[in-house]
Image (cartoon, coloured by chain):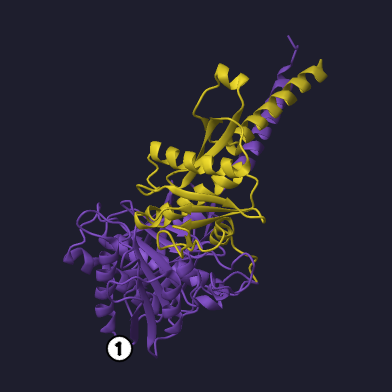
Amino acid sequence: MFNLTKKHLIIYSAIILVFISHITSFALPAKYIKIRYSKSDGLVRIVLESNSYNLIRKSKVFTSYSLVKIAFHDYFVLEPEEIETPLFEFNHKGKNLYFNIKELKWIKLLRLDNPPRLVLDAIVEGKEAVPPKPPAPPEGKKESEQERKPVTEKRTIVIDPGHGGKDLGIYNPSKSEKDIVLRIARKLRRSLSRNKYAKVVLTRSYNKDLGILKRIMIARKANPGLFISIHLTSSNSVKIYTALGRNPEGRESYLLSESQSKFINESRRFAEAIGDSLKGVLDIEISYESLNIPVISSMNCPAVLVELPGPDFLDYNRKNIALISKAIEEAILTLWD
Amino acid sequence: MRIIVFSVILILLLGIGAGVFYFYYHEEPVTKPLITETKEAIVQNYTYFKIYYPVGSKMEIIEKKVPGLMNQTKKAETLIKEYLRVSRELDTGIIPPDTDILGVYISDDGTLYLDFNTSLKDNFTGDVTDEYMLLKSISDTMISNLEIEDVVILVNHKEVETIGGHFYVNRPIKELLRIYTETGTQP
């Protein structure tokens, strides 16, 4: 009825297609992953940098002999699609990336922010592995807090078993949070104390009432290098909290320490190390949250609050307490290595 | 004729664009009316309350109508009682058993003091999220319905450091919640 010629139809169809593709691409900005790599003596470092924090945070890594599979929760564009190197081969299929790393012995993982990136340190057969310097941050951004110091002197870790005394925390008829977290803390202290470089301080080593402010004062007095507060959640999951950063007033107060903002990235790395380690012993969902919980926000060091599954969901018998304690210990030692 | 065709295509494209934006960016409000409008509501004076309650880690709202018009203090007292009742009815799991309100005061500077019995603290059993949602639901419910600046929680006529062992409550809670969730400008 519009008396359109074939030529007009083609032009109009093309215009419609261009518009639709523009609208769709605007509404759904493409997530990408950029691959870069380096090699030093006995170690191949592969860095996957993304524009999506969630893409990196929610990625899962699986290894089998020389094959490494990284499963992402969403589709992404890979840049570049091909790299010619004798060190490894890789394939991009759907939401997954597959690496075949030659002579792979084991891998270490690191998830970093600003920009979000997943760092795979592949230890390969050959000479003794010498860890290279951490991946360089983007230009103009300082990352001094992420540089690791070699362990040459005693480091203090403060373990804070939550609740206590009249404050039971989460409980069922037979078990309470205050007792469970105290047992885990004590076990962790025993294990860590075997390390000659570790000094362990507990905010409470027996069942007693202890307020938030008193915990903070005990911890800060010990001048710790790491702080971990252990609690339970009311669900069948593990939640690991880190602070958000500076308080809105931008000044030190009894509620929040200004200096915690310097340790945000290290605290998140600590959280991820604990999460990865716990994942190995508890087949359970692990989530990471950021909230200025006073006990962690007031620390002058990397600090996390870990919530383990509630007593209705996990039997806190001797074996499980040992497993959890061992997992947290490994995360601490990995961070200190 | 060409102008008509171009106009039709343009309207079509704008429609597609608006549709895409609507589906990707529009979020439905979570308000759920609990009581439907009745004949009495039209002829009788009602006080309307919005009561916030947690569902998982999200906050939802229920609208309640209470007969009669009230002054601020009476309104605050009725509101906190409605809040406790709704929380129990919906089994939100954050209000400890036997929790009751002992008194309600509003200071000259617009701070609302809610004085609970000791069950609020003694019977509280919850994790970080539960405690945070308890504070937030009380704060949001009170501040959205009353002409007040902030809310202070008392237990048995006294200030307490914490309810559940994770967060302070010895300061006005709206201010505390802001500190717990916001980050300042990074240096």
Q: Between residues A158 and B88, which one lies in front from this camera angle?
A: B88
Q: Between residues A255 and A131, which one lies in front from this camera angle?
A: A255
Please name the color used to draw chain B.
yellow
Report the quarter where the N terminus of chain A lies. Answer: top right
Provide the letter of the chain coloured purple: A
Q: Position of residue A120 (x, y in %)?
A: 42, 67
Identify the chain of the residue marked 1, using the numbered disc in the image.
A
| Residue A178 seen in the figure | yes
Label 1: which secondary element = loop
Q: Position of residue B125 (x, y in %)?
A: 34, 54
Q: For the view shown, which residue lies furthest in the top direction?
A: A1
Report the quarter where the C terminus of chain A lies. Answer: bottom left
Give the residue type at disc 1: Lys
The residue indicated by pointer 1 is: A196
Q: Position of residue A29 (x, y in %)?
A: 60, 46
Question: Vertical placement of A299 versus B182: above or below?
Answer: below
Q: Residue at x 38, y 69 (%)?
A: A229
Q: Residue at x 29, y 65 (%)?
A: A178
Q: Between residues A316 and A286, which one lies in front from this camera angle?
A: A316
Question: Vertical placement of B132 versus A322: above or below?
Answer: above
Question: Vertical placement of B167 versus B21: above or below?
Answer: below
